[in-house]
Amino acid sequence: AQLLLTPLALAMIPHSLMAIAGPMLGGKGEPLAELTVQAATATLLVFALVIAANFSLVVLAWTVCAVFLVRFLGMTHALCRRIGVSVVDVMGALRGGLVLGAAAAVAAIGVEYLLATNSVAIDPMTHLAIVMSGIVIVCGALLMGAPSLCLDNRLGWLAARLLGNPGLVSRLPFMR
């Protein structure tokens, strides 16, 4: 199951990022745009799964991951066209999350390495608490030490475009 969980867990990242695009398109009066992308993606998924089924279950899982990424890109592109922003603006707004995610991954791997090399025998809950503490410390230090690396005004600008309320967004600390 471990070989299958990695691609399926990774597929949830673009799926989560894409999840808001459908309701936003519906709210903007463009449900047909979502339907078009979802239908194209469903067609792609069927063809990709038929091909991947000839290899292995692991290839099948990675195929699902790839199709989820394609769906995220298609839905994001459709939403960007409807609200008048570029994909570069969206990616810039997501930059902080990507930086923090990478920092969290590095922290988790580092703490795991330290625990493994010191042969510390601890129960699983304590182990998890130690790893999570390392992640919180690294991400907190990054946010405090280099806030402009994680938070910038593009995130606020995009939120204002989506919400239609620049006054609310301008009160956020990183917008000043």
Image (cartoon, grey):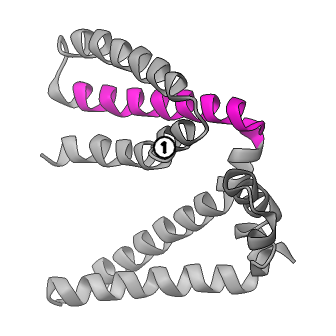
Residue at image mark 1: 23
Judge whether residue 81 is colored magenta.
yes
Q: Quadrant of residue 84?
A: top right
Q: Secondary structure at mark 1?
A: helix
Magenta part of the chain: 59-88
Q: Alpha-carbon neighbours of circle 1 within 10 Å: few (<14), some, or many (≥20)?
A: some
| Residue for point 79% across, 58% down | 157
| Residue for point 50% across, 68% down | 106
Which residue is more in the foreground, 63 or 165? Answer: 165
Quadrant location of the C terminus in the rendered image: bottom right
Q: Is residue 23 left or right of residue 55?
A: right
Q: Quadrant of residue 142?
A: bottom right
Which residue is more in the foreground, 95 or 55? Answer: 95
Q: Is residue 166 left or right of residue 52?
A: right
The image shows residue 175, relative to residue 140, as above or below, that is above
Q: Amino acid at mark 1?
A: Pro
The image shows residue 85, relative to residue 31, as above or below, that is below
Q: Is residue 120 left or right of residue 174?
A: left
| Location of residue 108 in the rendering, given as x and y in whole percent from the top left corner | 41, 73
Q: Quadrant of residue 150?
A: bottom right
| Location of residue 172 in the rendering, given as x and y in whole percent from the top left corner | 74, 77
